Image: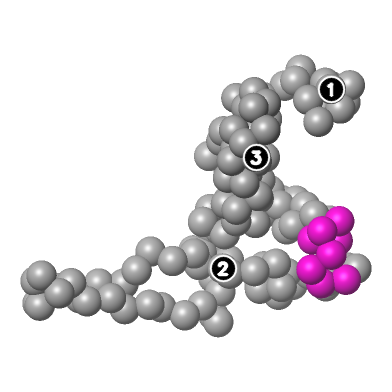
Amino acid sequence: MHQFLGNCGVFQKEFVFVTNGDFDLMHIATETEVKNVPLRNYLMRWINLKKAWPGKLFPNPGAKKQVLYDFENANQIYEAKKPVIDNVQSMLKVLDLEMEGKQGAAIDDCLNISRCIIRLLQADFTFT
């Protein structure tokens, strides 16, 4: 992968991976440790689109709020910090985009997530 990214000129600019959850890149870190392969710096940070979702810019009316109770202080009730958006289908719906390809197929998910990112950038959303 490192050689492929280099051949594509990715290292010529600043970049970060955008994911639809933390699992994949966390799994890569685990796999590199198990296989005794060096973990590249660019694999240690990423943007989880679910967590970075601009809820004020593109609210998700279907989002469920989770209420939690603090059992040590019975007077404290608070809402959990859950992602505003929970899956690619919700993202597409909120952005008024149609699903392309097959739901759950990795390459099609990449295409659809990319389309969501492009739409967010067009709306002047800044990923930080």
Give the x, y percent position of residue 84. Answer: 50, 67
- Which numbered tag is attached to residue 31? 3
Determine whether the residue tagged by mark 3 lies in a helix, strand or loop.
helix
- Which numbered tag is attached to residue 3? 1
Determine whether the residue tagged by mark 2 lies in a helix, strand or loop.
loop
Mark 2 Cα shell of 10 Å, populated few (<14), some (14-19), many (≥20): many
Apparent side of residue 33 relative to residue 4 in the rendered image (left or right): left
Mark 3 and mark 2 in contact (Cβ < 8 Å)? no
- Which numbered tag is attached to residue 81? none
Q: Upstream in the sequence, badge 1 or badge 3?
A: 1
Q: Up-down: is 100 above or below 35?
A: below
Mark 3 Cα shell of 10 Å, populated few (<14), some (14-19), many (≥20): few
Residue 105 seen in the figure: yes
Residue corresponding to mark 2: 85
Q: Residue at x 71, y 73 (%)?
A: 89
Give the x, y percent position of residue 37. Answer: 67, 26
Q: Upstream in the sequence, badge 1 or badge 2?
A: 1
Which region is colored magenta? 102-109
Amino acid at dot 2: Ile
Q: Residue at x 79, y 68 (%)?
A: 104
**Which one is in front, 80 or 105?**
105
Mark 2 and mark 1 in contact (Cβ < 8 Å)? no
Mark 1–mark 3 Cα distance, whole angstroms, equals 18 Å
Apparent side of residue 94 relative to residue 54 in the rendered image (left or right): right
Apparent side of residue 64 relative to residue 87 in the rendered image (left or right): left
Mark 2–mark 3 Cα distance, whole angstroms, equals 28 Å
Residue 111 is inside the magenta segment: no
